[in-house]
Image: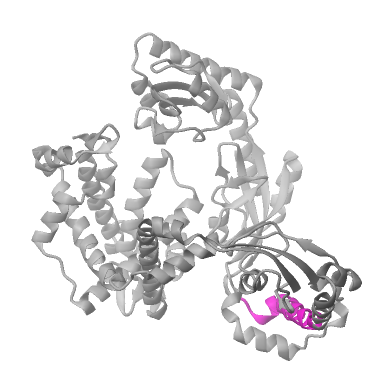
C-alpha cells in the first residue's frame, strides 16, 4: 500500500506551492510581478490564471524531476511549460464544449468507473499486479483499504473521473458515426497488397538550366499570398558555443569497475540485489524498482548487455559488464526461451573527485571571464585565454541544440527566453562537459516575411516551370515508344529506361518516390500499357506497366474483422485529433505568457 503515500505528498505539494504563489502575489514576499488575478491566457474570453498555470507547472516539474532523478534542464522545462499550457487551453475548450452539449458526470458514474476502470498509473502499479498483469482483486482490496482511503486515494480518483468521464462522453459523441465500410477496408487492403512493376523513363528538372527559366516578382508575390501558412517558421538563433569537456581517464574507468566489483561483493555476501540497486544504481528509472528492467525478448538492450544477460542462469549475478553507459551488474530472475526477466545496477564512468574539481574550477573561471551583457568580446577573450574549442551552432525555438551528435542542455531555451544579442549565457552542466553560449543573432518565429522566403519561392516556381517545359519532350518519348519500345525511345531522347522492383501503392519506390503521381499511374493502367507524360515535383515520367497482381480477396475476408477493429480505432483517434484541432483553430486564444514573464524578469531586476 506504499503507493497511497504519493497522493498525500501531491496534496501537500499543491498546498505549499499555492500558498507560496499567493504570498508572492499578495506582496508578503516583496513586490510581486503578478497578482492572483493576472491572466496568462484567455480562451474564448475564459481566463487561465498565471497562479494556476505556475501551480500546474510546478506540480508536473516535480513529478518529472522525481522520475529523472535530477533537476530539469531549461529545454526540458520549456517543453514541459508548453505541454502544460496546451493542456490547460485544451481543457478550457473542452469545458466549454461540455457546457454547450450538456455533458455532466454523476456520483454514481464516478463510483462505477472507479470500481471497473482504474487510471493508467494504477494499472501499471507493481503492487496491483500478479505475474506482470493487473489483478482486479488486488485493486478492489486496495480501494477498500483504510490506509489508501486516508491517504487521499478517493479524492484523487474523484478528481480524475470528473475530468475523464466527460471527456469520454464527448469523444463518444464525436466518433459515434465512425464505421469503415467493407468498400473502404477493401480499398485500404488493396493499397498495401496490390502490386506492380514498371519500366520508366524520367526527364528530371536538372536537364533545364536555371538561367532559361524566368520568374517575376509578381509571380512570387502571388504564390506567397496563396501559400502563407507554408512559411510559418520557428524562431532561429545563431550561437557561439564554448565547450569545457569533462575528460575521463583510464583511472576513472578503473575506479568505476572497482566500485561495481565492490557492489557485487556486497550482493554475493548476502545483501539483496534490489536494495543495492535502489541505493546505488545510476539508472534512476529502474533503480526505484530494484533494478527491474521488465520481461521481454531479444533486441531490448545494447549488444554488450544483451550478450552477458543471455549467458547468465536465473539468480546468477554477472561480473561487471562494460557498455556505452558504464558498468552493469546484471541478474536474470527468469528465463523462458528468448524471454528474460532481468535486473541491473548501473555504475557510470565519471571523473574522479580531483579531476572533476579541476574541471569545475576552470569552468567557473571561464564563465566569470566571459560573462557580460555589454561586451560580447569577453567571450572571445575567454576562448583565447583558456584555449577552448568554440563552434557556431543554430538553435530552433522549441528544440534543444545538438553539437557533435550530443544534446546541449538549456542553451536553446535560454536563447529564446529573453536573452539579448551579444549576451552570454549561464554555465550549463552536462555529464560530458560544461557549456557556455553567446547569442550572436536572433530571428523571431512566426510567419516569415516575403523578403525572407523570396528565393525559396522563386526556386519552387522555377521547378514547376521546368516541369512544364519537359512535358512536350516526354510526349515525344511516349509517341516513339508506342511504335518501338520505351527503352529505344528513351535512348533516342538522351535518357534511359529503368525498371523498378515490385511495389505497392504505399511503397517508397527507388526512382519514383512515395505517394507520387507516377505510382498512381502504375495502378491506373493495365499490364503492358504505356502512359503519357506523368508530371511530378522533380520531373516528368513515361511508364510501361510490366507487372500487375491484384490482392487476394479471400485473404482479405479472412482478416476483415481484425482489420475493422484496428481501422475503426485509428479513425476514431484521427477524428478526435481533428476535432480538437478544429476547436483550437476556431477559438480565440490570447497567449500572454511572454508579456507576463518579461514583466516578472523586469520586476526581479529592480
Left or right position of 358 against 156: right
Residue drawn 41% across the image and 22% down it: 332
Image quarter hosting the C terminus: bottom left
Viewer-closest of 429 and 7: 7
Q: Would you identify the image quadrant in which residue 345 lies?
A: top left
Whether residue 92 is situated above or below residue 323 in the rendered picture = below
347 shown above or below 103: above
* Residue found at x 59% / y 23%: 354
Q: Position of residue 426 (x, y in %)?
A: 56, 49
Residue 37 versus residue 321: which sits nearer the camera? 321
Q: Which residues are magenta?
A: 448-471
Image spot of residue 66 (x, y percent): 36, 41
Q: Is residue 579 left or right of residue 442?
A: left
302 and 426: which is toward the camera: 302
Q: Could you say where residue 428 lies in the image, as x and y percent from the top left? A: 56, 45
Q: Is residue 97 above or below residue 357?
A: below
> What quarter of the picture does the N terminus occupy?
top left
Magenta span contains residue 458: yes
Amino acid at each position: 500500500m506504499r503507493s497511497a503515500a504519493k497522493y498525500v505528498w501531491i496534496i501537500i505539494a499543491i498546498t505549499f506551492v499555492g500558498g507560496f504563489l499567493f504570498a508572492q502575489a499578495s506582496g508578503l514576499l516583496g513586490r510581486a510581478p503578478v497578482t492572483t488575478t493576472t491572466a496568462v491566457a484567455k480562451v474564448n474570453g475564459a481566463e487561465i490564471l498565471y497562479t494556476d498555470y505556475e501551480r500546474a507547472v510546478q506540480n508536473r516539474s516535480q513529478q518529472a524531476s522525481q522520475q529523472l532523478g535530477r533537476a530539469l534542464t531549461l529545454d526540458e522545462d520549456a517543453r514541459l511549460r508548453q505541454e502544460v499550457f496546451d493542456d490547460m487551453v485544451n481543457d478550457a475548450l473542452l469545458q466549454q464544449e461540455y457546457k454547450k452539449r450538456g455533458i455532466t458526470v454523476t456520483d454514481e458514474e464516478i463510483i462505477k468507473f472507479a470500481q471497473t476502470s482504474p487510471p493508467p498509473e494504477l494499472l501499471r502499479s507493481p503492487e496491483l499486479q500478479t505475474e506482470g498483469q493487473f489483478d482486479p482483486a488486488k485493486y478492489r482490496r486496495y480501494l477498500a483499504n483504510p490506509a489508501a482511503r486516508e491517504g487521499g486515494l478517493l479524492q484523487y480518483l474523484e478528481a480524475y473521473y470528473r475530468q475523464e468521464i466527460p471527456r469520454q462522453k464527448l469523444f463518444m459523441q464525436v466518433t459515434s458515426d465512425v464505421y469503415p465500410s467493407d468498400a473502404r477496408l477493401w480499398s485500404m487492403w488493396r493499397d498495401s497488397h496490390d502490386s506492380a512493376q514498371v519500366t520508366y523513363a524520367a526527364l528530371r528538372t536538372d536537364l533545364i538550366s536555371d538561367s532559361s527559366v524566368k520568374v517575376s516578382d509578381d509571380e512570387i508575390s502571388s504564390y506567397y499570398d496563396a501559400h502563407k501558412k507554408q512559411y510559418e517558421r520557428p524562431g532561429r538563433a545563431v550561437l557561439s558555443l564554448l565547450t569545457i569537456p569533462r575528460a575521463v581517464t583510464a583511472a576513472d574507468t578503473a575506479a568505476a569497475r572497482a566500485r561495481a566489483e565492490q557492489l557485487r561483493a556486497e550482493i554475493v555476501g548476502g545483501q539483496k540485489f534490489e536494495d543495492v540497486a535502489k541505493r546505488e544504481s545510476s539508472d534512476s528509472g529502474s533503480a526505484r524498482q530494484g533494478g527491474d528492467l521488465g520481461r521481454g525478448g531479444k533486441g531490448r538492450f545494447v549488444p554488450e548487455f544483451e550478450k552477458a544477460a543471455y549467458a547468465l542462469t536465473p539468480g546468477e549475478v554477472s561480473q561487471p559488464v562494460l557498455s556505452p553507459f558504464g558498468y552493469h551488474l546484471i541478474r536474470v530472475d527468469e528465463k523462458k526461451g528468448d524471454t528474460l526477466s532481468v535486473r541491473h545496477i548501473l555504475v557510470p564512468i565519471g571523473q574522479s573527485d580531483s579531476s572533476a574539481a579541476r574541471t569545475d574550477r576552470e569552468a567557473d573561471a571561464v564563465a566569470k571571464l566571459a560573462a557580460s551583457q555589454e561586451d560580447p568580446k569577453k567571450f572571445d577573450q575567454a576562448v583565447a585565454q583558456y584555449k577552448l574549442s568554440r563552434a557556431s551552432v543554430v538553435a530552433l525555438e522549441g528544440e534543444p541544440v545538438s553539437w557533435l551528435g550530443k544534446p546541449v542542455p538549456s542553451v536553446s531555451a535560454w536563447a529564446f527566453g529573453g536573452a539579448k544579442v551579444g549576451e552570454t549565457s549561464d554555465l550549463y552542466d552536462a555529464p560530458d562537459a560544461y557549456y557556455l553560449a553567446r547569442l550572436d543573432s536572433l530571428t523571431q518565429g512566426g510567419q516569415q516575411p516575403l523578403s525572407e522566403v523570396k528565393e525559396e519561392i522563386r526556386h519552387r516556381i522555377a521547378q514547376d516551370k521546368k516541369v512544364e517545359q519537359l512535358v512536350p519532350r516526354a510526349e515525344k518519348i511516349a509517341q516513339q515508344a508506342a511504335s518501338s519500345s520505351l527503352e529505344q525511345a528513351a535512348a533516342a531522347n538522351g535518357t534511359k529506361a529503368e525498371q523498378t522492383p515490385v511495389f505497392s501503392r504505399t511503397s517508397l519506390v527507388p526512382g519514383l518516390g512515395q505517394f507520387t503521381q507516377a505510382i498512381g499511374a502504375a495502378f491506373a493502367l493495365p499490364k503492358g500499357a504505356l502512359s503519357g507524360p506523368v508530371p511530378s515535383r522533380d520531373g516528368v515520367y513515361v511508364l510501361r506497366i510490366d507487372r500487375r497482381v491484384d490482392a487476394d480477396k479471400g485473404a482479405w475476408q479472412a482478416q476483415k474483422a481484425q482489420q475493422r477493429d484496428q481501422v475503426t480505432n485509428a479513425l476514431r483517434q484521427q477524428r478526435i485529433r481533428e476535432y480538437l484541432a478544429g476547436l483550437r483553430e476556431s477559438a480565440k486564444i490570447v497567449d500572454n505568457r511572454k508579456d507576463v514573464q518579461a514583466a516578472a524578469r523586469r520586476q526581479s531586476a529592480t
